[in-house]
Image (cartoon, coloured by chain):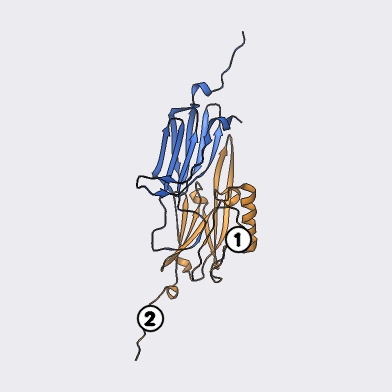
Amino acid sequence: MSLLNTLIPSRRGAMTKDDGEAHPVSRPLFEIDETDAGYGVTVYLPGVAKDGLEITDEGDELRITGRRASKMPGGLTALHRESSDADYELVLTHDSTVDTGKIGAELKDGILRLALAKAESAKPRKISVS
Amino acid sequence: MRLIHYTNPQALSVAPSAGLGGRLQLGDIEDQIDWLFGSALTGFAGAGRGGQFPVDIFEDKDNTYVRAELPGVNRDAIGVEMVEGSLFIQASRKERTGDAESSVSFNRLVGIPDDVQADKVTAAYENGILTVTLPKKEEAKPKKITVSVS
């Protein structure tokens, strides 16, 4: 599968923020769609608003961090919990198959859609036979 | 003693969710088995694949809050109905895979305490999370009773 060779998510445990404490993170669920021109990544981030979302591209790693804006304030008793309060973190590795200058992102209703254009070298090329 | 039952949506635990003295049951045993089957076959119990989504229940002294994680559903397609003792949540989301467009629908029946003012229930949908606020009946709120001892 060509997809495995290109975008490979890596596993992380807890991440340490600036205050030195370890914050638990959970990996959000996501889907990747590949077309000839690029990749579409859909990441499910319920509870994350635009100001809690951070997307950074470092080297060949695309890192998506989301802080939940809807943590329940104190004073509330939990009767039944199925979701967790952990922040989301997703790291996708690509080896220069993605043109990082052209990444489009849209966050709506807790779903982040990324449009990643393939780098020129990764696009299928027709070779003509003389 | 208060019992808070935590469920890890990504683990396949066989333990049934605990009721609080019969007050709160998250569906009956059939619903729980359906949920286990759903999460076993799809492997994504939390995302909403196969019609399942995580639900939290909180309370303070005035209200009970039911919170459901429903990213990307159409606002007009969200339905919240209250039947005696339960809240029925349904929602649907349009998905586009390539050129085809399909619709995924979610629904879930959640047990809620009986002491709810049915006509004052409100719901809000923000950032993919639906929060239903159920105000408690006056007589259900904790009240201070002063006792004078002669």
Q: Residue B81 at x, y = what percent?
A: 53, 61
Does dot 2 land on a helix, a strand or a loop?
loop
Q: Is residue B73 left or right of residue B50?
A: left
Q: Residue B75 at x, y = what percent?
A: 48, 50
Chain A painted colour: blue
Query: Which chain comes out orange in the rendered image?
Result: B
Do badges 2 and 1 share one subunit?
A: yes
- Tell which circle, 2 or 1, labels the residue nearer the N-terminal end: 1
Given the current orientation, which residue lies at the most extreme top position?
A: A130
The quadrant of the picture occupied by the C terminus of chain B is: bottom left
> Mark 1 Cα within 10 Å, few/some/many (few <14, many 20+)?
few
Does dot 1 land on a helix, a strand or a loop?
loop
Q: Residue A15 at x, y = what percent?
A: 43, 45
Amino acid at pointer 2: Ile
Return the mark for residue B145.
Answer: 2
Q: Is A66 above or below relative to A128?
A: below
Is there a contact, CB below 8 Å, between mark 2 and mark 1? no
Amino acid at pointer 1: Ala
> Which residue appears at 38% of the width and 61% of the height?
A74
Q: Which residue is mark 1?
A: B15
**Image quarter for residue B108?**
bottom right
The answer to which of B81 and A31 lies nearer the viewer is A31
Q: CA distance from mark 2 to mark 1?
A: 39 Å
Q: Residue B99 at x, y = what percent?
A: 58, 34
